[in-house]
Image (spheres, helix red, strand yellow):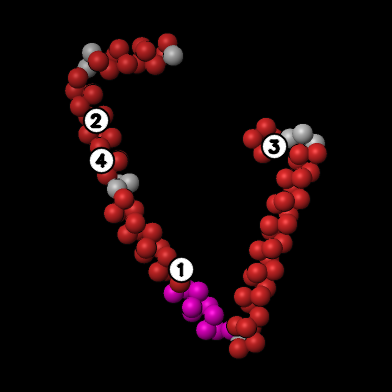
Amino acid sequence: TATFAATLTDALRHPDNLKNWSGAARRTAATFDRARTSACMFKLYAELVTAGRVKRSLLSPFARQLNPVMERIATEGRIIADKAGALIDSLHGTTPASAS
């Protein structure tokens, strides 16, 4: 806190630095604009959907039918493993927050 106070005091003595930092902060914040971020995420989603369609089109008809079932089984396995891990952690008196 003393370091923060000293840095703040120093910054207040140099208004040009404050102006530059403010401008840099505004430019950085603009990169996280909701519309821009949404557009980037939509583009990524479209690319992933297209790649998935191409990948599925290369599979045999049998594999196309079987893959969703296998994905569901894998997802259920991950859920069960997560729940079992949480149970083991609770039995040992640890939590993910306290384990790290």
Q: Which span of residues is magenta-colored?
A: 50-59
The amino acid on which the numbered mark 2 sits, given as a three-letter code, is Ser
Q: Which residue is mark 4?
A: 27
Quarter of the view holding residue 18: top left
Marks 4 & 1, CB-CB < 8 Å contact: no
Q: Secondary structure at mark 1?
A: helix
> Considering only order in the chain, which callout, 1 or 4, is on the residue closer to the N terminus?
4
Q: Secondary structure at mark 4?
A: helix
Q: Which residue is mark 2?
A: 22
| Distance from Cα at disc 2 to Cα at disc 3 | 40 Å
Q: How many other residues sit within 10 Å of disc 4, few (<14), some (14-19) or many (≥20)? A: few
Q: Is residue 35 magenta?
A: no
> Considering only order in the chain, which callout, 3 or 1, is on the residue closer to the N terminus?
1
Q: Which residue is mark 1?
A: 48
Residue 29 placement (x, y as % from top left): 30, 41
> Residue at left 26%, top 29%?
21
Q: How many other residues sit within 10 Å of disc 2, few (<14), some (14-19) or many (≥20)? A: few
Marks 2 & 1, CB-CB < 8 Å contact: no
Residue 34 horizontal side relative to residue 97, left or right: left
The amino acid on which the numbered mark 3 sits, given as a three-letter code, is Thr
> Residue at left 29%, top 54%?
36
> Residue at left 20%, top 27%?
19
Q: Which residue is mark 3?
A: 95
Q: Secondary structure at mark 2?
A: helix
> Considering only order in the chain, which callout, 3 or 2, is on the residue closer to the N terminus?
2
Q: Nearer the viewer, residue 77 or 52?
A: 77
Residue 42 placement (x, y as % from top left): 37, 63
> Considering only order in the chain, which callout, 2 or 4, is on the residue closer to the N terminus?
2
The amino acid on which the numbered mark 4 sits, given as a three-letter code, is Arg
